[in-house]
Amino acid sequence: MIMRPGQQLLLPANPLFIWFSLFAALALNLLTNMGLWGRAAWVPDLLAITLVFWSVHQPLRIGVGTAFFFGLAMDVHQGALLGQHALAYTALGFLAIAIHRRLLWFPLSQQAVQVLPVLLSAHALELLVRLGAGHGWPGWPYLAAPLIEAALWPLLTVLLLAPQRRAPDPDDNRPL
């Protein structure tokens, strides 16, 4: 892949770090669902953002199957209709892999704007399954969750790419 001018060369991603970050995001989701806000509709889905991030940056390692597994884990935890989160996360993983080549050419702020429709579509799919199962409308704050998730995209990108960054000390013998 041709790199953009000024883009830093990254070390390969450690698979243990990838899986640790996914399980940490799952744990944070579980804690926020049991914590202060409960299952408030506006609370961002940190696992969804992390799945999108790794599906974009490591599409050969993290894909639709991983998203399905974590979706089932969220369904079991929340006592939701089995497959509600699994379907949404699977669609999320597919869409993230579909845009991963184009997305990485943009700066972080524009990446957040382009990730927003992916997150909105996953939340809309989850809402359709929920409404189809006979549950009520969660309210208009439900639309705030994808906006907050897209706003968290630059922060999450900086945090999850930090272990891969090389020390910026080039010299005449090591230009990279």
Image: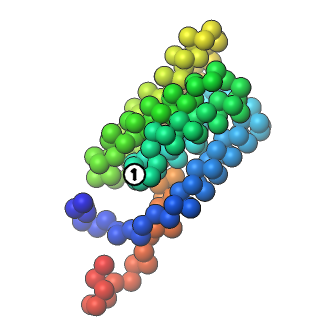
Return the residue nearer the eye: 134 or 66.
Answer: 66
Q: Position of residue 14 (x, y in %)?
A: 50, 64
Q: Residue furthest left?
A: 2
**What colour scheme has been applied to the protein in the rendered image?**
rainbow
Displayed quadrant of residue 83:
top right
Work out whether residue 159 can be spotted: no
Which residue is painted at 28% across and 52% down in the image? 105
**Number of marks in picture:** 1
Which residue is painted at 39% across and 51% down in the image? 60
What residue is pinned by disc 1?
Answer: 60
Q: Position of residue 33 (x, y in %)?
A: 72, 35
Q: Residue furthest bottom?
A: 173
Which residue is painted at 44% across and 52% down in the image? 61
Identify whether 12 is placed above or below 87.
below
Displayed quadrant of residue 8:
bottom left
Identify whether 81 is placed above or below 133.
below
In the image, taking residue 142 as reference, residue 158 lies left or right, namely: left
Q: Position of residue 115 (x, y in %)?
A: 40, 39
Return the residue nearer the eye: 116 or 15.
Answer: 15
In the image, taking residue 87 as reference, residue 141 lies left or right, namely: right
Mark 1 residue type: Leu
Secondary structure found at label 1: loop
**Crowding near pointer 1: few (<14 within 10 Å), some, many (20+)?**
few
Work out whether residue 46 can be spotted: yes
Looking at the rendering, in which quadrant would you find the C terminus? bottom left
Looking at the rendering, in which quadrant would you find the N terminus? bottom left
